[in-house]
Image: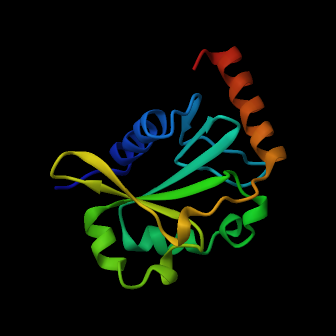
Amino acid sequence: MEITHKELVAKAKFWLQSAKVCNPVFTERGSAKFREFPDAIGWSNGQCFVVECKISLSDLRADFHKECRKNSHKSFGNFRYFLLTSELYEKIQNRFTDFIPKGWGIIILDYSSIGIRQLRFHGSEKFRSNIVAERDFLRSRILEIQRFGR
């Protein structure tokens, strides 16, 4: 079953709202100032959750080399996940360290029930997030909503 990146992002948003009880949740928005554009980001109980959605091996490989992955203290999110299609997960399951930064969680889209199955990888460790960047992100979203109503 083929799925688009946009559909995967919608699943990530739903997962953040339901499994992590996040509110607010934003999708495909970012901060040019901090050069990070998460596919889905949400807040719950003072914690920030980031989900990056990947449907291809080349996209996953490119993400691994982003500056915000190399310097995790400059990134969004206390908890960080990759949402992968089950096909992509099958391709990398024996080579996680080549594609998934240490400490990140993995969420797999399970087509049989059109649901999401969460796996923990390296304990989905808690990161020290860039709180300044997160506040800047939230401020820019609030200003956007005030100006344009979205």
Q: How many marks?
A: 0
Q: Is residue 70 above or below residue 40?
A: below
Q: Quadrant of residue 149?
A: top right
Find residue 78 and report its horizontal and vertical position in percent.
Answer: 67, 52
Q: Is residue 23 left or right of residue 68?
A: left
- Does residue 96 lie above or below 4 as drawn? below
In percent of width and height, residue 91 lies at 30, 78
Please tell me in which quadrant of the rendered image residue 92 appears. Answer: bottom left
**x and y, in percent, of residue 117 in the image:** 32, 54
Quadrant of the drawing holding the C terminus: top right
Counting from the top left corner in percent of width and height, residue 7 is at 33, 43
Quarter of the image for the N terminus: give it: bottom left
Q: How is the image coloured?
A: rainbow
Q: Residue at x 73, y 38 (%)?
A: 137
Residue closest to the eye, 100 or 34: 100
Query: In this picture, is 123 found above or below 117?
Result: below
Q: Is residue 107 left or right of residue 144?
A: left
Q: Residue at x 21, y 55 (%)?
A: 2
Q: Residue at x 79, y 52 (%)?
A: 130
For the view shown, which residue lies furthest in the right direction?
A: 132
Q: Is residue 101 above or below residue 27?
A: below
Q: Residue at x 24, y 54 (%)?
A: 110
In-front residue for pair 58/122: 122
Residue nearest the observer in this picture, 144 or 16: 16
149 or 21, which is in the foreground? Answer: 21
